[in-house]
Amino acid sequence: EICAVLEAHISPNSDQARIWQQLQHYAQFPDFNNYLVFLLARGQGKSFEVRQAAGLLLKNNLRAAFVSMPPSSQQYIKSELLPCIGANNRAIRSTVGTVISVLFQIVGVTGWIELFQALHQCLDSNDLDHMEGAMDAIYKICEDVPEELDVDVPGLSERPINVFMPRMLQFFQSPHASLRKLSLGCINQYIVVMPSALYMAMDQYLQGLFVLVKDPSADVRKLVCSAWVQLIEVRPSILEPHLKNVTELILQANKDSDDEVALEACEFWSAYCDVSMPPEGLREFLPRLIPTLVSNMVYTDDDESLADAERKTNPFRTGTRI
């Protein structure tokens, strides 16, 4: 019955009000979420869309109901999620990572030691599905509650971030773009909070950025620019010794073939001015910087119309809106 409702739920022409009523009825059963995690984890023969729908519904239910569930159901849900971190299907892995992140926010490391152990095993497995699934889950945790991995945990000899950080830095050299992207994305989440694990590995991190700035993946190059923007915003003293090299590379990124990379690189100049870095540091780059920024300006038709209107109403105004 649940499968039939979920199949109708993802159908564009279904009666969503009626389906919502059915799901609300099922939610009254104490083990309803057990069925959902079973479908997500073991729903062989069912479409990936139905399994995903079960996982997303489970995620929403956990936010509101996990703490009031019977302990046996709580443990069942945890135990079913862990083997699916490395599921063969990327969509299922991603959904499992989302559910894990939500559940982690509720219970923390101390309430789910097995998660930390499972993620560690997946990262060391050398199996792409397992490594990618673990990194996806870690990324989502870092995105939501990065500080929760930088805590002392009874029963663990190291803080989780101290164990994950070296592995993530190693993934900078992975032949798989997905792992390079996820690992860099994870570490970038820690620039603001700056745990000792990242501070002690800062030289390795910066050297990794200098290599990844030429990565074939535009997503990775964009994250490199984002890292430099964050560093100059909140940790300018760390970037200052490397500022000349970084400025040169940002100038090159402003001309990147991918518009999103070029746009992210532009944020660096705004951040540079906001933190009041020494202006002489930019002086030698101005002959190249100004033409680069001007040549990459984009105007919409509305912008041009507004500029013309402004010039007609104010003959002394000759500038153009940017």
Image (cartoon, rainbow, N blue to C red):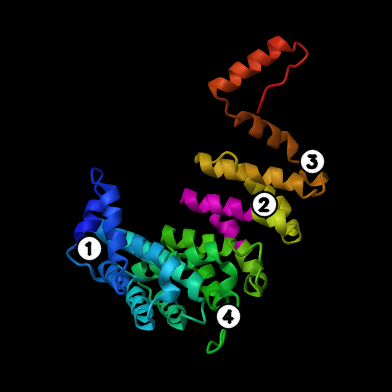
Which secondary structure, mark 1?
helix
Q: Which residue is mark 2?
A: 246
Please give the range of residues in magenta: 207-228
Could you tell which of marks 2 and 1 lies nearer the N-terminus?
Answer: 1
Q: Which residue is mark 3?
A: 283
The answer for how far apart the CA atoms under marks 2 and 4 are is 32 Å
Name the amino acid type tagged 1: Ile
Quadrant of the snapshot with the N terminus: bottom left
* The furthest residue to the bottom: 155
Name the amino acid type tagged 2: Val
Q: Which residue is mark 1?
A: 2
Dividing the picture into quadrants, the one containing residue 36 is: bottom left
Could you tell which of marks 2 and 3 lies nearer the N-terminus?
Answer: 2
Disc sitting over residue 159 in the figure: 4
The verdict on residue 221 being magenta is yes
Q: Mark 2 or mark 4, which is nearer to you?
A: 4
Q: Specify whether 200 is left or right of 223.
A: right
Quadrant of the snapshot with the C terminus: top right
